[in-house]
Amino acid sequence: MTWYDVDYPEVIGVRAKIFPERDNYRMIGSLVIAPQWLQRVPADLPALIVAEGLTMYLRPHDGHQLFRRITDHFPRGVIAFDAHNRNGHPPDEQEADPRRRHRCPALGYRRSE
């Protein structure tokens, strides 16, 4: 298994000073919505995509395109992400009421041939 971190180039630059790449750990400095970074990740195995702290910053169109590219690239896998909606509450209210804490749904998929 190889782990790939995709983040802004500036963030990857700092991260590389703290956590250098290893045989099973790679860093890709790119905007996550840019299609080119995905070509640097092999597509021959199932994938676990963790999009933590990301989806709330994407425009709906960009998010749809990103997830479509991911599911087109990998034949099968799981995408885990934290989801938010318009009815969200300020963070202090969410922490006070455990029923309103963020949840991380996981969506399994298998590309049909």
Image: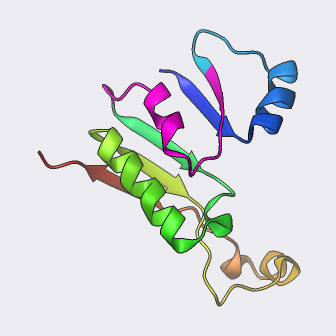
Q: Residue 36 placed where, x, y %?
A: 50, 37
Q: Nearer the viewer, residue 15 or 28?
A: 28
- The answer to whether 98 is drawn above or below residue 38 in the figure is below
- The answer to whether 54 is drawn above or below residue 96 in the figure is above
Colouring style: rainbow
In the rendered structure, which segment of residues is drawn in magenta?
Answer: 26-45
Dividing the picture into quadrants, the one containing residue 14 is top right
- The answer to whether 101 is drawn above or below residue 40 in the figure is below
How many labels sit on residues? 0
Residue at (87% x, 20% y) in the render: 17
Dividing the picture into quadrants, the one containing residue 88 is bottom right
Q: Is residue 56 magenta?
A: no
Q: Nearer the viewer, residue 7 or 50?
A: 7
Residue at (58% x, 29% y) in the render: 4
Q: Residue furthest bottom?
A: 87
- The answer to whether 5 is drawn above or below residue 76 in the figure is above
Residue at (15% x, 49% y) in the render: 112
Task: Tell me if 47 is positioned left or right of 92 in this view.
Answer: left
Q: Is residue 36 magenta?
A: yes
Q: Residue 7 placed where, x, y %?
A: 69, 41
In which quadrant of the rendered image does the C terminus lie? top left
